[in-house]
Image: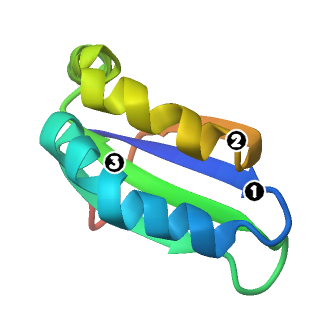
């Protein structure tokens, strides 16, 4: 199992609009294609205006296939520009759990 942690720094003041778009339009598409959502977070202390979401995949091949399917979905192609306009910086990490992690 691997985990993908995506961190987005949003333009100041756009967190509510971003969350509304994701809740109303985006998350169902993502869950339909990407599978298991581990968590979706907003920063409260530290760097502000950050969104972090974590997805679980069997392996890199599973991730690649699922992300390709999402990218090919016409509904996602309509949705994506709406949130891209709110994002300033994107960071992506692939994480492997340790042998003693509760997420293994």
Which residue lies at the image location 14% right of the left edge and 42% below the top edge? Answer: 32
Q: Are marks 2 and 1 in contact (CB under 8 Å)?
A: no
Callout 2 environment at 10 Å: few (<14), some (14 to 19), or many (20+)? few
Q: CA distance from mark 1 to mark 3?
A: 20 Å
Which residue lies at the image location 23% right of the left edge and 37% below the top edge? Answer: 34
Query: Would you name the residue on which mark 3 appears?
Result: 55
Q: Nearer the viewer, mark 3 or mark 2?
A: 2
Callout 3 environment at 10 Å: few (<14), some (14 to 19), or many (20+)? many
Decide: is 76 above or below 15.
above
- The answer to whether residue 71 is seen in the rendering is yes
Taking depth in this image into account, of 18 and 62 the one nearest to the observer is 18
Q: Nearer the viewer, mark 2 or mark 1?
A: 2
Q: Secondary structure at mark 1?
A: strand
* For marks 1 and 3 on the same chain, the one whose residue lies earlier in the sequence: 1
The quarter of the displayed image where residue 85 is located: top right
Q: Which mark is residue 10?
A: 1
Q: CA distance from mark 2 to mark 1?
A: 9 Å
* For marks 3 and 2 on the same chain, the one whose residue lies earlier in the sequence: 3
Q: Nearer the viewer, mark 1 or mark 3?
A: 1
Callout 1 environment at 10 Å: few (<14), some (14 to 19), or many (20+)? many
- The answer to whether residue 99 is seen in the rendering is no
Q: Secondary structure at mark 2?
A: loop
**Whole-percent x, y for residue 26 in the image:** 34, 50
The quarter in which the N terminus is drawn is top left
Which residue lies at the image location 32% right of the left edge and 54% below the top edge? Answer: 25
* For marks 2 and 1 on the same chain, the one whose residue lies earlier in the sequence: 1
Decide: is 74 above or below 34.
above
Query: Would you name the residue on which mark 2 appears?
Result: 85
Which residue lies at the image location 51% right of the left edge and 71% below the top edge? Answer: 41
């Amino acid at each position: 199992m691997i985990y993908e942690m995506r961190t987005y720094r949003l333009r100041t003041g756009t967190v509510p609009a971003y969350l509304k778009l994701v809740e109303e339009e985006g998350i169902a598409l993502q869950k339909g294609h990407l599978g298991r959502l581990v968590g979706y977070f907003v920063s409260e202390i530290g760097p502000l205006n950050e969104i972090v979401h974590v997805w679980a995949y069997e392996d890199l091949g599973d991730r690649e296939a699922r992300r390709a399917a999402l990218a090919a979905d016409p509904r996602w192609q309509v949705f994506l520009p709406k949130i891209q306009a709110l994002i300033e910086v994107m960071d992506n990490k692939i994480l492997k759990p340790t042998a003693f992690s509760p997420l293994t």
